[in-house]
Amino acid sequence: MVRLENLSKAFRGRPALTGLSLEIQRGEIFGLLGHNGAGKSTTFGLMLGHLHPDGGEAFIAGHSVQRDRARAISRVGAIFETPAFYEYMSGWHNLRFFVSLSGLVPDERLMEAVKLVRLEKRIHDPVRAYSHGMRQRLALAQALLPDPEFILLDEPTEGLDPEGIQEMREMIRHLRDERGLTVMLSSHLLSEVELLCDRVAILHQGRLIFCGSWKSGEPQWRLDLDDWAKAAPVLERVGAVSGGKNLVSLRAGGDMADVVAALVQAGVRVRAVEPVKATLEDFYMGHILP
Amino acid sequence: MSLFLRQLAGELRKLFARKRTFIGFGAFLVFEIVVLFLLRLEKVQGTVRRVIENAGYDASVYLSGLTLGFLIVMWTVFLLEALFLALVAGDVVSKEVEDGSMRMMLCRPVSRGRILLLKGLVAALYTFALTLFVMLTALLAGFLNSGVGGLFVFAPLEGVFAFYDFWPGLLRYLAAVPLLSLSLFTITALAFCLSCFNMKPSAATVITLSILFADTILKNIPYFESLKGLFLTHKMAGWIHVFDYRIPWEMMVENYAWLLAINATLFLIGWQSFERRDFKS
């Protein structure tokens, strides 16, 4: 669905993105992570043709954004961190205006999108009277019109309350599961990305330092043992790998019960065994920190 | 075509849904009332009456609504309308960039050139609408104040001095609307061009007005008399010659051809700048 080839961009000589290449498959929810200034928004800008790259090319549905932008983004919807609507116009007129730039869309279709984001009661109010959550929902409605295959969400949960965050998460899932949309999102809320994304890319100082599934590692356990020196050869014998910080991972097919039995037999006292649930935050920090 | 019209309607709605757009209309109404009030003062009327009578005409016929309408337009339009045109046209692109709505527009499969074309058309329509409004309300105010009568035209800088009966005068007055709009569109085009560059909306407005004022000042320096024809404001004043007994068509066509070329060039410069720009948050 999306292919980025060696994308680079610098602002006033300072590199914002260097040689970014990645691919996103159709129907995937893909997360883009990174600190502020890591190049996430630059990537989105290049993918939408808001920015001209210094090098490289972005392809959406097989069309180059740089050479044939209109065709490449004809089935793309996007939301920004702070969606900028015309405050003095109603939500409805905002929608009509933005959608008219994509083509002729009947009012019934607009209303469907409004209902989907549950804004039908306030859609004729001026946008200046909208809360942040309502603006985000309006932004989602406009991103879903007329009929995107791929949506870009730049910090879609920024500034939302917990209820709004959950609503947005369910909406994104619904869009992928029910409508088959491909989604690319960036967020500082790693817990949200963890719940939503199939794969992630991590940008650090404009460079891609990881791309793939962060869950691909072997399951880990935390052991509380009285003598790690005595336990080391036993662990090696049963095929468990010590990962430091009292962590042990098992090779494919390994069973923790066998490991515990072997340790006890060897005279090592096992005080506690606890499965460690890998979090995206740990994974992210593990890549970012030196 | 229908999609283009819908997009144009959307742009027009955006422009006319803003209160700021109407400041110009409101300001002109107030200003016209003030000028009319001043023109009612005996001292002022006496001066105008003397000029008419010295030329051998009857002041009771030519100190009319049509004459007052013309005077209001001639005295006010270049400074006051220029201000509002620069304000609105200076905002057209740069305000949207500043607010972030331009990025939202550019998420759509529409070319930058088309966006600018729509905005340029809207700015042109606004110029025409404001000019038409100014000329018609000035005329209406003149009629309400002094009733129907002949037209007396006195524009010393352009060398126009003429008297017309009501109908020929009204015809020339109405013919001046599109010509004045075209003249004033140069200000719109300049502000529009500047707003395509990476600058604040207020900067586009201020630079436009500065250029206009500088041009006026230079044109009025006596030593530059021989260069007068080169100045922008001189070419823009061509509309007044529609009130000449014998309209100098050759000069007017030349002036307006220049203005059209300048406007087209300004649009192209703005477009090129807009195409090359990066839009980021």
Image (cartoon, coloured by chain):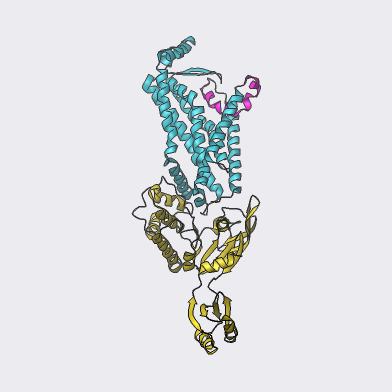
Image quarter where the N terminus of chain A lies is bottom right
The one nearer the camera, A91 or A35, is A35
Give the dominant element type of the magenta stretch: helix, strand or loop.
helix
> Does any portion of residue A24 appear in the rendered image?
no
Residue A118 drawn at (x, y percent): 36, 58
Q: What count of labels does the image hold?
A: 0
Q: Is residue A23 magenta?
A: no
> Can you give x and y, in whole percent of width and height, for residue B78 in the image?
51, 27
- Please state if A86 lies on the left or on the right of B248 as rendered: left
Residue B232 visible in image: yes
Q: Considering only vertical position in the picture, is B206 above or below A76?
A: above
From the rendered image, report the letter of the chain displayed in cyan.
B
Residue at the spot 55% in from the left edge and 37% down from the top edge: B203
Residue that appears at 61% across and 38% down = B265
Residue B261: name its quadrant: top right
**Residue B133, how many percent across, how many down?**
43, 31
Measured as percent of width and height from the top left, residue B269 is found at 61, 41
In this rendering, position of residue B161 left or right of residue B45: right
Task: State which quadrant residue B266 falls in.
Answer: top right
The region drawn magenta spans B221-250
User: In which quadrant of the rendered image does the C terminus of chain A lie?
Assistant: bottom right
Q: Colour of chain A?
A: yellow
On screen, B88 above or below A102? above
| Residue under the image location 43 percent in, 52 percent down | A95
Q: Which of A94 and A255 lies nearest the eye of the viewer?
A: A255
Q: Most extreme residue toward the front, as rendered?
A: A226
Residue ranking furthest to the left: A121
Q: Residue at x 56, y 53 (%)?
A: A50
